[in-house]
Amino acid sequence: MKPSGVGQIFRERRKSLGLDLQALSNRCGLSRAQICKIELQGKMSVASLFAIAESLGLEIIIKPKEPT
């Protein structure tokens, strides 16, 4: 998955929960500008990844990649 795909997942989940950027910002402790950038570009620190995922009720799972 490309980093931008993670941002897209976050945006879709945020909207499905009826949260605006400010509401998510309040939940995860990141600024609205940071969240907007993450949703558009997908680039973030591991700490931000986990903070947003937790705030949106998402679980991060790391597993071996399937052979192609």
Image: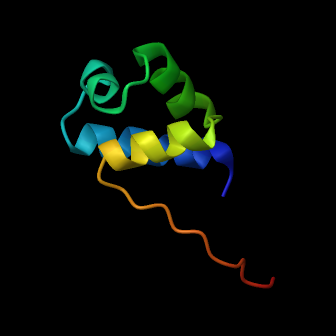
Q: Is 61 displayed left or right of 26 in the figure?
A: right
Nearest the eye: 55 or 7: 55
Q: Is residue 34 above or below residue 64?
A: above
Q: In which quadrant of the rendered view does residue 63 lie?
A: bottom right
Residue that sits furthest to the right in the current view: 68
Q: Is residue 5 left or right of residue 24?
A: right
Residue 60 screen position, x and y as percent: 48, 61
Report which quarter residue 55 is drawn in: top left
Residue drawn at (60%, 44%) of the image: 46
Q: How many marks?
A: 0
State how the image is colored: rainbow
Residue at left offset 43%, top offset 41%:
51
* Residue 67 versus residue 9 in the image, above or below: below
- Work out which residue is located at the far bottom of the displayed protein and give it: 67
Q: In which quadrant of the rendered view does residue 38 lie?
A: top right
Query: Is 58 drawn above or below residue 23 in the view shown?
Result: below
Quadrant of the snapshot with the C terminus: bottom right
Q: Is residue 22 left or right of residue 68?
A: left
Q: Is residue 50 left or right of residue 23?
A: right
Q: Position of residue 31 (x, y in %)?
A: 43, 17
From the top left corner, tell me how far across and down residue 1 is, in percent: 66, 58
> Residue 41 at x, y = what percent?
63, 31
